[in-house]
Amino acid sequence: MKAVVYKAPFQVAVEQVPDPTIQHPNDVIVRITSTCICGSDLHMYEGRTAAPPGLIFGHENLGIVEEVGSAVTTLKKGDRVVMPFNVACGFCKNCERGFTGFCLTVNPGFAGGAYGYVAMGPYPGGQAEYLRVPYADFNALKLPPGSEHEDDFVLLADIFPTGYHGAELAQVSPGESVVVFGAGPVGAMAAYSCLLRGASEVYVVDRVPERLKKIEEIGAIPIDFSKGDPVEQIRQRRGGDGVDKGIDAVGYQAIQPGQETEAPSAVLEALIQIVNPTGMLGIPGLYVPTDPGGVDPHAKEGRLLISFGKLFEKGLRLATGQCNVKRYNRYLRDLIIAGRAKPSFIVSHRVPLDEAPMAYEKFDRRVDGYTKVVLKP
């Protein structure tokens, strides 16, 4: 089958690789109909992780069940399914408590597994024609048959639940004011989720015009940090006041406003400044314990200098961690079916799998309006 394979920093290729096979009675094989390029894939693409050459990318996957293991009880051939990016067993201590992003079974020695991601277990990704899904009864979410809502449903694999997770981490409540740093796919979904949860004002900080335009279209307030300190811009709009809650959807590759250099703690510092005392910070943006491309020795080890004293003084609380997709995806699916949510507003391009190298390059450079790419095997 064809698959997107990592070769070297800034280089992927579509190559022929072995077809997946049933390895356990609870596996299924899914024929992929839609798979997305994620911002997290770009960390590997840019050589900012220890991803080995030959890794098959792709953790946002939707398709049709083609083959069913003998122990699978809830799925059959022909079912349309979307898979959380988390690979989880469903029965360990963490899975039983709903923390499927931190499964203790699927990746021995590490809490959590995922498709096509460095250090997240032996699970090839789904930017390919077919995908093996382990623990399939638990990991595959059934969808209505047909092709309706394809672009919406594929976002249930990661970015819609992850954006919602950001709002949940920050405990966003009706009537509150919120700032989201980052208007990429996850930041856009976080802002959208805050609006779904009834936030009164949602400010979104970025500098990419196409992203900020999409943010404005959903009713959030764009803040272009290339035009000045975003903290001051928001305070001016709010008569000197800060906001109730804050979400970091950027992570460790943050850029200092007014500069082109990375400053890994820039967003965290801005959140500490702009969120009002006793507020909450939700941090779904990716931070890593090792970064080969870190800007200094501390950043290379995932160590950041932040104003912890100010955070303490203001009584701010923070919550972090990757999304436990299964906690949200069934309910978000039903919002889509009911017409209450349409996250596909963020999808900008649908391209054949063979064009993945070009799509990676353009998405990484944020050019030609590339905000979210769906690959079509």
Image (spheres, helix red, strand yellow):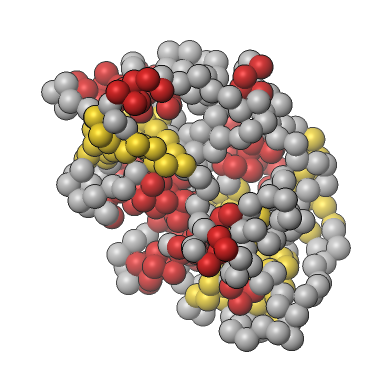
The reply, left or right, for residue 311 in relation to residue 208 is left
Which quarter of the figure is the C terminus placed in?
Answer: bottom right
The reply, left or right, for residue 135 in relation to residue 344 is right
Task: Tell me what residue is drawn at x 64 percent, y 74 percent.
Answer: 136
Q: Do we see residue 371 in this rendering?
A: yes
Residue 191: quarter of image: top left
Coordinates of residue 360 in the picture (x, y in percent): 65, 41
Height in image: 92 above or below 284?
below
Q: Do we see residue 255 in this rendering?
A: no
Nearer to the camera, 43 or 306: 306
Height in image: 250 above or below 66?
above
The reply, left or right, for residue 16 in relation to residue 352 is right
Which quarter of the figure is the N terminus placed in?
Answer: bottom right
Task: Tell me what residue is drawn at x 33 percent, y 16 percent.
Answer: 228
Residue 59: quarter of image: bottom right
Coordinates of residue 187 in the picture (x, y in percent): 42, 41
Coordinates of residue 114 in the picture (x, y in percent): 65, 55
The reply, left or right, for residue 309 in relation to residue 184 is left
Height in image: 173 above or below 179?
below
Coordinates of residue 73 in the picture (x, y in percent): 62, 86
Height in image: 71 above or below 149?
below
Task: Tell me what residue is drawn at x 65 percent, y 25 percent.
Answer: 301
